[in-house]
Amino acid sequence: MVADRAGHNVAVEQRGRHAGTSPWPGRPGFLACWNGSAVDAATVPPQSPELNCLRGVLPPNLLEAARRRAGELGTGADQVLIRWGVIDETTYLHRLARHLRIAPEDFAQVGRDDTPLCDDQMRFAAAAGVMPLRQNGDLVWAMAPRRMAARTLCGVLHDHPSLRSRFRVAPQCAMQQFLQQTGQGLAQHASFGLQRRYPALAVSPCDVEIGWRTGLRRAAAGALLAAALPLLCAVHSGVVTALLFLGFIGLRLAASLQPRPPAPRSARRPDDALPIYTAIAALYREAASVASLVEAIEALDYPREKLDIILVVELDDLATRAAIARLGPRPHLRVLIAPAVGPRTKPKALNYALPFVRGGMVTVFDAEDRPEPDQLRAALDAFARGGPTTGCVQAGLCIDNITHSWLSRLFLAEYAGQFEAVLPGLTRLGLPLPLGGSSNHFRTAVLREVGGWDAYNVTEDADLGFRLARFGYSAISFDSRTFEEAPIGLAAWLGQRTRWMKGWMQTWCVHMRRPRLFWRDAGWRGVLALNLFVGGSVLSALIHPLLLLDLATTGLALAQGEPLSPPSPWASLHGLAVAAGYVGSAVVAAIGLKRIGRLHDAAWLLLMPLYWICLSIAAWRALGELVWKPHHWQKTEHGVAARAAPSPKAVGKTLVRDSASDPRRPLRASASC
């Protein structure tokens, strides 16, 4: 920025003219009201006092177009100009401060002792965008304007000019950087907030306890496991295990066979009725995927002025940070550096972002995700249908790299059954949902109320679904899809599935820690869903090889004409359980495949027994990891497979975009803060 006033005016005006001409020819939306031609010296209408500081800097017709766009959205006109890159936030706030005769604040000379907030209160400042500061013996308020804040500040200072000394305006990036550097409470809360607030609902972070206690607990757990193995081998020939196995299969079938009528079409919400929506992605070693992820989020049919993107990266992940920086500046995207405190897990990174969320709604995406463009609007419609007690809505996940291996094809079938058949069926049955790790949408206030994510649970999504139920909130599925990438090699698949199995074990242990309390909180539906769905999925994978061993032993003895000694009284029941498991899983998968239009891939379901053996290997590995490294996060590599084209449904939807966007606009930018 040039210090000379005239030079500064010229720089900003040229940027504004560039924003309205060649890059976006014929664009609908607020810039279409201005073609960059010469205009008279019209004044900015008084309804938008936040634009008065830009008179003589940007052409009046451009300011009028921003004012009209702000009226359509129910937001400040300053946010329109900033989010579309017509003027950067720092430049605007310096002009606003000069116009209002208040001081700007860049936090360069502000230390930790200059704020009266304790460490634990810093997250409230991050959420509100307001920071109290001590300056020259007085208490002043530094605010990073959002929504209508700049307009409100103009009105307050116009009516009460004596308050000018009490206010400062600060860029979002400056306040965010200050909070990250001085807010140790944010890092502690991200790692241990749930354990401190609701200790009965959280995985114990045993890795940070005193060494001898950790060793003693692990030794005891190992001894119990060694003692339990012979018992498990003995019990597997009993009726209880087989019945639990059949119960798990029966619940999945019952859910999948529920009718799924099409969701009623809702009238398109006007843009001014849309809340600010925050999308969070926790990234680690995702340099190859970050550009396509940002492009997919920007393709969502949602006003840019109300779309807030947060990417959380690790401090030592220089490649991903460099990939984000190469995208260039993006006013609607922020980057947070996850603190080196507590476990290195996705839920801890998400927790760290939660205080910085600006939106009333928040969703989570993974690095490889490509959500359908209307997903945010569809989620809002689902919340409206579900009512105020709906805390989360889950979109379907669909695999789109299915041509690489038999494993990815069966992964597709499994996902289709889970998200197109089972979860919609559980919704209709009124049962809690074990959420998927991506494309779950929350009311931000509800998410904060229940404590956010468990930083030490490696399937934080499933755990959160049951915690919502314990607080009286429901989670429902809705008709929208996010396209994902399946692991294409056995090693990658096994690592991912081991983590899932371990997390489901953690989830079951946490909520069944006090069964009576869980029954009181979640009711019989919660107990049924947790034990048959989460517990049943783990138990079925663990006992599957034992059932096969019993059947093989029985079959071999019969084939040789030898009498069974001792006889196996439950061999028939075990055979029924195994057959029901294979057939039931195939039926659920076939229902899902039909609903996504890929029933022709059902022939691959003949390999279901082999897939189940792989699941069993993952389950036994998970049981070992639960003892020796319970919070280890097995990273799944993304961006290693060629992706299929989106479905026709998704392609059609890409033509429905924000009324102020241009489908010809190339991918550009990222955030500098």
Image (tube, rainbow, N blue to C red):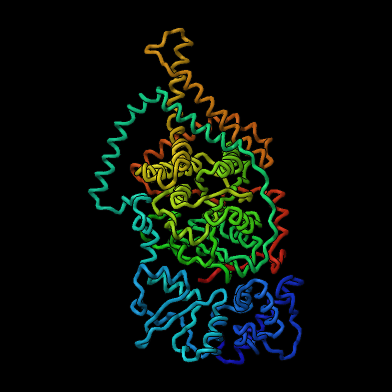
Front in this rendered view, residue 103 or 558:
103
Q: Is residue 592 left or right of residue 93?
A: right
Of all residues, the one furthest to the left in this rendering is 212
Residue 234 shows in this picture: yes
Reply above or below: 348 against 574: below
User: On the image, which quarter does residue 344 sit in?
Assistant: bottom left
- Is 325 situated left or right of 515 in this image? right
Q: Residue drawn 45% across and 26% down?
A: 242
Task: Indicate the position of residue 71 as horizontal and vertical percent values.
Answer: 66, 75
The x and y percentages for residue 454 are 41, 53
Location of residue 21 with respect to 94 vertically, above or below: above
Taking 155 as reference, is 596 above or below it?
above
Q: Residue at x 36, y 80 (%)?
A: 114
The one nearer the camera, 92 or 240, is 240
Say if 212 sits above or below 53 in the image.
above
Q: Answer yes or no: is residue 405 visible.
A: no
Report x, y in % for residue 635.
Answer: 46, 49
Q: Position of residue 48 (x, y in %)?
A: 63, 82
In front of the other: 220 or 402: 220
